[in-house]
Image: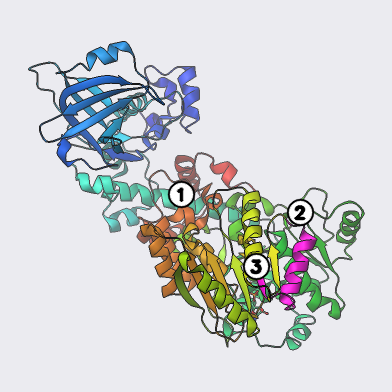
Amino acid sequence: MPLTATAERPVTDLKGVGTALALKLQRLGISQLQDLFFHLPARYQDRTRLSAMGGLMPSIEAVVEGEVQLCDIQMGRRRALLCRLHDGTGLLTLRFFHFNAAQKNQLAKGARVRCFGEVRPGPAGLEMVHPEYRVLKAGKEEPLEQALTPIYPLTEGVTQSRLRSLILQALEMLGSQPLEELVPEGELKRRNYPALTDAIHYLHKPPVEADQQALLAGTHPAQRRLAFEELLAHNLTLRQARTKIQRYGAPPLKATGRLSRPFLDQLPFQLTGAQLRVAREVARDMNSEQPMLRLIQGDVGSGKTMIAVLAALQSIENGRQAAVMAPTEILAEQHYINFKGWLEPMGLKVCWLAGKVKGKARAAVLEEIESGEGQIIVGTHALFQDDVHFNDLAVVVIDEQHRFGVDQRLSLREKGRKDGTLPHQLIMTATPIPRTLAMSAYADLDCSIIDELPPGRTPVKTLAIDDSRRAEVIERVRQGCSQGKQAYWVCTLIEESEALQCQAAETTATELAEFLPELRIGLIHGRLKPAEKAEIMASFKAHELDLLVATTVIEVGVDVPNSSLMIIENPERLGLSQLHQLRGRVGRGSQESFCVLMYHAPLSRQGRERIAVMRETTDGFRIAERDLELRGPGEVLGTRQTGMMQFRIADLQRDADLMEAVHQCAVHISSESIQAVALGRRWISDAEQYAQV
Ligand code: ADP
Ligand code: MG
């Protein structure tokens, strides 16, 4: 049989697979035998040894064996069959919510039972809920499993044992035929990786003598070899998306300086070295005949807005339009106000478009955008609704990108397509992403980093205070504000409705107003109308308010240099990067700033660590690295980001050390080569959709 033939045979060639099962398997992205080979175990269970009941710990999975002491139906809130086992070292309760009479009879007093399940704390000692179990025949030795048991990701209607037996059947058919190697040979040699077919057999059927510790930890060479290949496949697929875009071409825009020079001259400050460097990188990209695809990473307050303005001006210098998009109205509005303030005196026309702009006002803006009279259009994603037609859009700036997902990032590219060209794209994020993560999540983008803050900033001092000392904290706000400082008071609530969040903020504002009658207190939350929000932000900025009580809506981008005190209630509820974003609202002026983390005791270990990190450092990249360690890549990138980055075997954290090599390897493979396409087909079930432009 030819080399690849077995791998490419349809699953219906397996015994017991008819059209019904084939359809179910398709939901797992499985249609050929090779899809089964690469449907890798998500983890392993260790059923090779018996555990003593006396040594069990909650949340581990274990095989135990013992004698039934007692078996009874418990009535009460939820009827359950409880069965108490003992093995001479301790006791364990089995709990079944679904059971029948036969089961109860089987588990009679004196029966010997072997079971496997996850140990949990129960009302009377440790339990297993719905364990797998078997009643043992008297006097007969039952062998334990010899090797680790692979556990596969499932879909409805396909059980673990069904899938396992299909995979074993398919592997049998494959035998020792080599699967097509898609990783460059040099790389395999250098890393001393096992051959692909061997690795696949090994992972589905770990041999008895396998290094179990390594397999359970996901660090076995067979796992690393496949993780490498999977990361390479993802990297190439993102690059492929990039290549597709670049085939469109873009309007080359000359940086004439006609507008940017007068703009920079009238600023009260000079750009930092890092801003200048990044601005040059952007200007060069925009002067190219391929669309710019650049990500700017810069900590809060590093001055990313300047880069956005310069990109917009370069477009207008060439008689074209620029669009600036932000994820929230409050942030988009702030940009609008700033851009208008800077650019209207220069005779430029700045437009505003958000979901809330309706009726005649909307029609008028749409007309300005279409006629080209509007030169810079600032807004939320309303900018990219179907009825918005740009006259001649040449650059799109997307601020605070981490709020948008990969899918949105890819789909936005289509907008502004014209005569086979696409606008240049500048993407900005204040959530620094550890380099290894950025290499895999943003393989389709060029990255620039603004790694310098404008001069004259003093780092924010961070304190952690138990909320039983609330009165002291309020006193601190009184003192600060009486000296002419301004303060934020941030209320947090998780997993509750926005309505509840707003209510909590309202209650806090009322309470603070009672304690601090001499202060002018404002309240801002997500339920206010954009105009109301803008008005409140404007009066806070103009120092007509001393204290601003807010929900986390102020998280991104809001800039009031005179505010130098921030209180965050229940900071333990927020992730590190969110806390970092919030804290970035203070420390923007020259005076010393404070951030008070008013936590609620007792803190979980995670909560304590997060607060410790916040006190230790103000460096966004350090914080992102710690966030990655504490919470994992899904949280750091945001679930929306990772939505399209589900890995079968790779783990962005565990395999971080492979990323650089994967990256180097990918650079040397054309993303449109047969090899790259085959990798995408093998590892990414919806590769085509992923790469669609
Ligand atoms: P972010 O990177 O968080 O978006 P902003 O662009 O909002 O930061 O800038 C933060 C503040 O720093 C603004 O008040 C801005 O005017 C100011 N700023 C930006 N660049 C400089 C600079 N080179 N020197 C001094 N202040 C600057
Ligand atoms: Mg910003």
State whether residue 423 appears in this view. no
Asked whether, in this view, residue 255 is left or right of residue 459, the answer is right
- Badge 1 crowding class, 10 Å Cα cut-off, few under 14, some 14 to 19, many 20 or more, is many
- For badge 3, the amino acid type reads Glu
* 666 inside magenta stretch: no
**Which callout, 1 or 2, points at the residue further toward the start of the chain?**
1
Asked whether, in this view, residue 526 is left or right of residue 378, the answer is left
- For badge 1, the amino acid type reads Ala
Q: Which residue is mark 3?
A: 514
Image coordinates for residue 92, horizontal then vertical, percent:
21, 32
Chain part drawn in magenta: 528-547
**Which callout, 2 or 3, points at the residue further toward the start of the chain?**
2
- Badge 2 crowding class, 10 Å Cα cut-off, few under 14, some 14 to 19, many 20 or more, is some
Image coordinates for residue 68, horizontal then vertical, percent:
18, 22
- In the rendered view, tell whether residue 206 sits above or below residue 584: above
Q: Between tags 2 and 3, which lies in front?
A: 3
Q: Between tags 1 and 2, which lies in front?
A: 2
Q: Which residue is mark 1?
A: 233
Ligand 2 shown in quarter: bottom right
* 537 inside magenta stretch: yes
Q: Quadrant of residue 478?
A: bottom right
- For badge 2, the amino acid type reads Ala
- Is label 3 in contact with label 1 (beta carbons under 8 Å)? no
The answer for how far apart the CA atoms under marks 2 and 3 are is 40 Å
